[in-house]
Amino acid sequence: QVRLVESGGGSVQTGDSLNLSCAPSEYNWMCMGWFRQAPGKEREAVAVISTGFGVASVTDSVKDRFTISLDVGKKTVYLQMNSLTHEDTATYYCVVKFERCGPAWYVADNYAYWGRGTQVTVSS
């Protein structure tokens, strides 16, 4: 079965940084990235990256602070999160799909597999 293992979450203070990583058991994906879900809120797209060309899409609310990257050799996707705020507190999920990221990259139902999530908690 496909397994997506996230790591790098933790409890930090406002202004700190974290680097999340996701190592999938398979790597035949055209699009990989991250969603997040805060308590009482819907899942929100954070960032995705095309595995073929490295083109990234990042949601406006975090694009000045977060950077997504891909290490092909390690078969791992990363999310570097800087200047964290309390509003970034959420469970972060690694997501993958066979299709291109495309203009509907932010639609959660488009992704075939989801990781179990890694918790990010930012104190005010």
Image: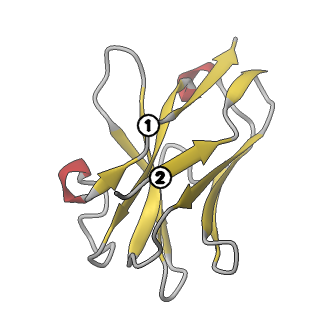
Query: How many discs mark residues in the rendered view?
Result: 2
**Residue ranking furthest to the bottom:** 53
Q: Does residue 81 appear left or right of residue 102 in this picture?
A: right
The answer to whether residue 58 is visible is: no
What amino acid is found at the position of numbered circle 2 in the picture? Answer: Leu
Asked if 75 appears above or below 42 in the picture, the reply is below
Rendered residue at 39%/15% (across/down): 39
Q: Does residue 96 appear left or right of residue 16 in this picture?
A: left
**Residue for badge 2:** 4
| Quadrant of the rendered image containing residue 88 | top right
Measure how far apart labels 1 and 2 are at the Cα level: 7 Å
Which of the two labelled residues, at mark 1 and mark 2, occupies the earlier sequence position? 2
- Name the image quarter holding the N terminus: bottom left
Q: Which mark is residue 116?
A: 1
The answer to whether residue 120 is visible is: yes
Q: Position of residue 84 (x, y in %)?
A: 69, 32
Q: Are marks 1 and 2 in contact (CB under 8 Å)?
A: yes
Q: Position of residue 38 (x, y in %)?
A: 42, 23
